[in-house]
Image (cartoon, helix red, strand yellow):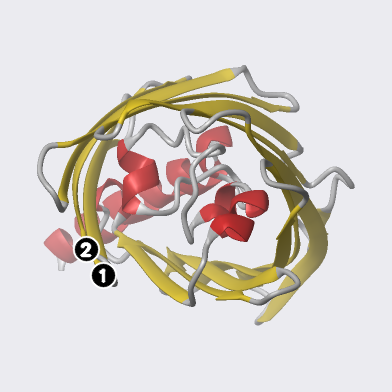
Amino acid sequence: MKVAFVKYGTLTLALFFVFFSKGFSIGDDTPIGAREVSLGNASVALISPFSAFHNQAALARIKSITVAVDYRQPYLIEGFASAALTFVIPTPVSNFAISLQQKGFPGYHESRFGCSMARTMGKRVSAGIQFNYFMIDFPEQGSSRGTFLIEFGLLFQTTNQLTIGLHIFNPSRASIESLNLKSNLPVRGTAGIALKPSANLVFVSALAYCVDCPLNVRMGIEYQFSDCFFLRGGLSGKPIRHSAGLGYKNRNFGIDFAIVHHETLGYTP
């Protein structure tokens, strides 16, 4: 009984710091996608199905129906999980995507549902917008609270080697309120580049600014060391995060693995 009590108390304390610190509030810039994680979350100029979470404009460059799934156990805390799903549907007029993210532990969940639209505006420019519904389950009230917000982005492919991405999240300053808690969703702007100096090498970097938070600098590198395999590394801060990962991709299938180390909270595989 004593061991169980200590274990439960340790889990509760850890989850308190994770959820109620500025570094992990609802709507935060939690990296989604193992490739994005391993590149330090410098993903605003990358083209990926997980752009539904990072810069919807990049979805306009996806040419075929794509489904992507992300799962992780943040900071190796037992019972604490984060999962995400995105489904991209290209059409002749615009590309559309549906996305879902959920994280939490038994008795407490945060959810995000999104519908996005993206389209090209000429050969080198694309734009995208997403409508989100954020929801928190409040176990002490036996109910849920939620709110709507938008995010949007632009992507500029200035040359075949250089892409610039811009993204704005929650410009309307939406928040979620219950009887005794108000969760302010962050207002955030991100700008970054993806530079491809050769066919098998990509450099990415980004600056993210969130109201009431310090400027966040991110960078990463991806090296394709064979026809289907990739090696990645990244760095971001503050807080300082080091990341690394491996990837495999063929014509119709890909799988990525990443691990990231938070300077305070530890490892997330």
Quote the CA–CA distance across marks 1 and 2. 5 Å
Q: Nearer the viewer, residue 219 or 197?
A: 197
Does 17 appear above or below 161?
below
Residue type pointed to by label 2: Asn
Q: Which residue is mark 2?
A: 250
Q: Are marks 1 and 2 in contact (CB under 8 Å)?
A: yes
Q: Residue at x 38, y 32 (%)?
A: 40
Q: Secondary structure at mark 1?
A: loop
Mark 2 residue element: loop
Q: Residue at x 30, y 39 (%)?
A: 38
Locate residue 204 relative to residue 249 in the image: left or right. right
* Residue ID at (81%, 58%): 149
Choose between 11 and 81: the one closer to the eye.
Answer: 81
* Residue at 24% from the left image edge and 34% from the top image edge: 200
Does residue 174 show up? yes
Q: In this rendering, is residue 222 above or below 25?
A: above
Place of residue 157 in the rendered image (x, y in percent of width and height, measured from the top left)? 60, 35
Front in this rendered view, residue 197 or 21: 197
Q: Amino acid at mark 1?
A: Phe
Q: Position of residue 221 (x, y in %)?
A: 30, 27
The disc placed on residue 253 is 1
Image-quadrant location for residue 91: bottom right
Task: Report the residue that reaches farthest toward the bottom.
Answer: 142
* Residue 117: image tag: none
The answer to whether residue 267 is visible is: no
Judged left or right of residue 40, residue 123 is right
Q: Where on the picture, by quarter, is residue 83?
A: bottom left
